Amino acid sequence: MTQISVGQAAGVIAAAIFIARLWAPGALALILSWLLKDRNTATTLTVSASAFHSSLWPIILRSDSSQSHGVRPIVRLVTNLITWTFFLIALAGIITPLGLYDALVQTRSVQVKFRYLPDTSPLGFGTPPRSNLPFNRLCGGFGYTPCPFSDTVVVDVASSDGQFQSNLPYGYNLSIPQFIYDVYSSGTTENTTVSNYFDIQWRRYYTSSDQQFNNGSTYLISGFSSMQSLIMNTEVQVVEGLVVDMVNGSIGLRNHTFPPGYPYGASWSEDLLFIEPETVCVNTNLTLDYDIALSPNITLSVINLVLTDRGGFIHLNQSYPEPNLTNPQANPDLWTRAYKSAWLNNALIALYYNVTDDNNSTTGRRAFSYVNSAINKTFQLPVPLYESQTYQSLTSTQLFGEFLDIGGGLDNSSNPALSSAPPNPFNIQQSNFSVIPIECGTAGGLDFANINTIFVECGFIQGAPQRQDAGTNLIFESGSTWSQPLYACASAVKATIKTVTFSYNGTGNVLSNLAVANVQDKEYPDKQSMPLWGVENTGDAYYLEDLLLVWGLISEDYTNNENVSAIRQPSLYLPGYSLDSTMAPIGFDNLPGSEAFLNAMGAPYSVEGSAAGTGLVDYTGLSDISMWIRWQNLSKSAEGIQTIPNLIWADVTASAVVGTKGVLGPGNTGSENVMPILVTPTVQRVKYHLLYAIPAIIVALLLLLITIVALATVIFGHNNIARLREQLHMLSPGRTFTTLLLQERDGMKISSKQWAKGSGHTIIDYSEGYPRADGVPRKDETTIEVPEKKDVVSNQYSEETHGDDDEHAEDEEPAGNKEHAQGYEQVGNGELNEEPHSEFRW
């Protein structure tokens, strides 16, 4: 349905009123014409004349008052100007309102109290109430180890076979020491909306109890289930406890509140703690190419599978790449890590196909002494039975070289073009590829736990299929040709602060009315204003497999604390190492800030086949064509493909954790805002498009000019109201008739009230085609003599006086009537019936 604006409605109304203003006088004048008879009082004629001339009938019928012949030019100009001004004002009255429109505008910012905003989406319904049970952690990779600052006592007893067994004589205290709470909450104790480490909680949780833990009391452990996928929501959205960026892939921590009382909405900005992955992918310049069988059966459709050299072999750099690991917090060097993974992947595959050779210290042979490849050269690959779908979607894994199916044998292949196994002269096995993630990530479970052993996850992504022949990209048509690019990627996870602009529209107390208008990295004027991050400093007493390091924003008081590693910079790369796993449905402790974000990174690098039983969404795209299309578009370049791990990570993490701090403080339990927030209300205002004001401006200028001329005639031309009144008397038809027919010398000078009470009651009769006043003797031919004057002639006219219907007497004009005519002069060039341009003087 077409929507019209307020201005358009006003314009239509103005046009209708204008038409009515023209129509009503015209129609009423038509009725008045019917009501008027041949005999009327002089006052009736005057009033009727005014009514007739207020309509358009004189113009339509081209009556006397609309004629211009014989009219003085200046008078004709002014009278025409009156008509033009009337229509111009009417036109301005119609056009001017068209410029009006309603607009929602922002007004002056104010401070207002916020209110909690519940989430009615699946993520909101699936989030249980927050538990009062505290955080906890269990330390020790093999056996039990007391966590830092814990009072737990662990006694390791050696058995007869040399094995050690951990005994807990007093049980194990899972509680987080108060010192840890104090340090990693200190950076946000002042008024701020930024969350800290202990404001992060598992979205879902379980309770557990064991006699050797916390004296048998109940404690929380992690839980995970994928409640709602946001992967196809290509926007920044809000869910219970989080701001989820599904454009770039990140999450912000916020327990949502809003400023009530603004029906048209409001906007404001907050600084929030964000956790975001940082991913870099490198194109291996190798592709998987295949055809779709002409007559595929229910289990097989991919045939003629080959590995194609797009430069990955022939242009392989012969120098071994090494990332810069001197300061991972300042520069994680993810590109070199990803490039190293791609280089190792290509080098091992080249050895597998005997494209080149390896170093041999015994024979003195140098690597890359030969390269048996060329651009677009192909190498046959097996298609593992019942795994054809692997080549019809995006897949990812932490197992580089897995697609080679080394050791699978020809019996496990359905590729009719594969006649023999690759030569593999250097005995390359799948285990050779297993070192690639370690070389890329550089941190393992037996590395010391500290601020510099940052978490880096590395993996291999097989991009979504790209069609190579003519046809649609959406259907695997029989006989069509497809290609999949291969990428090596490296991902880290960092904590940072971003400024988020929110807007709230509507009056309902629901989270769906809250929207994110903008997200940008927080800007800092200098280094000193940057956030101060801290990570537990264990003095290399723990390995990464022994504990989950606590991190967070800290105050200046702990900058030089020996148990804290402090760093001042915009972001903090989270410490940890890859566990080659993803989110577990149930965990062992309750420390989501150290565990959830790292475990979630396993999901982007384990996208293979069916997701059934993993608790995760099917991210291959096989079961969701819109996802498949999105992956296909992103798979065309390394810059696009590196967004996919970030998006999958954000989707998984949104179901894993929740932020508990909002404007009302931790848990939104405060009665007042933790800090003053300026809210900019949105209000409705009437605004105007100036283009539509042009006719009104012209009218205003014209009215100004007319006013100036009118004042000038009064000031300099001796014009006044008395003169105007006299001229109105002169142009009154009833007064004119009585003055002429009754020959009243003062007929034009007496007041309107006197004339109406006197001569105005005179009956003017038009029944014989000319006016005759009742009470004036009838005469057939009466000559009015005027004083002799040059070019002045006598006028003869016939006058018939009608009395009652039965009286028709004809009498000669009395001689005395000549005297009444002496008060009038006719100045002209001939007789009245011959010269229409006569000028009358009164």
Image (spheres, rainbow, N blue to C red):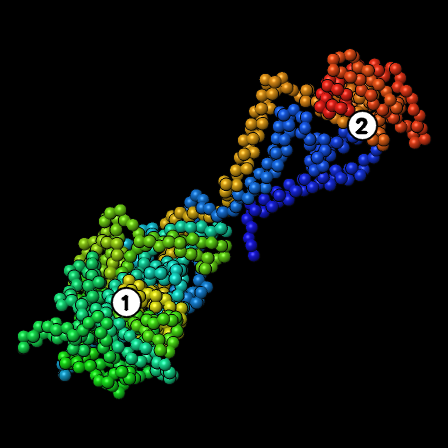
Determine the residue positioned at 92% across, 31% down: 805
Left or right: where does residue 52 sit relative to residue 402?
A: right
Residue located farthest toward the bottom when viewing the structure as drawn: 411
**What element does badge 1 sit on?**
helix
Snapshot quadrant of residue 728: top right
- Neighbourhood count class around disc 1 (C-alpha, 10 Å): few under 14, some 14–19, many 20 upward: many
Kindly identify which numbered label has been placed on residue 42: 2
Whether residue 607 is visible:
no
Say if 550 sits above or below 346 in the image: above
**What element does badge 2 sit on?**
helix
Determine the residue positioned at 53% across, 35% down: 697
Residue located farthest toward the right when viewing the structure as drawn: 806
Which mark's residue is nearer the viewer, 2 or 1?
A: 2
Determine the residue positioned at 29% across, 64% down: 637
Question: Is 507 or 170 nearer to us in this picture?
Answer: 507
Left or right: where does residue 392 sit relative to residue 17?
A: left
Snapshot quadrant of residue 837: top right
Whether residue 79 is visible:
yes
Q: Which residue is mark 1?
A: 598
Where residue 709 appears, as percent x and y from the top left, is 58, 24
Determine the residue positioned at 33% across, 62% down: 249
Q: Quadrant of the C terminus?
A: top right
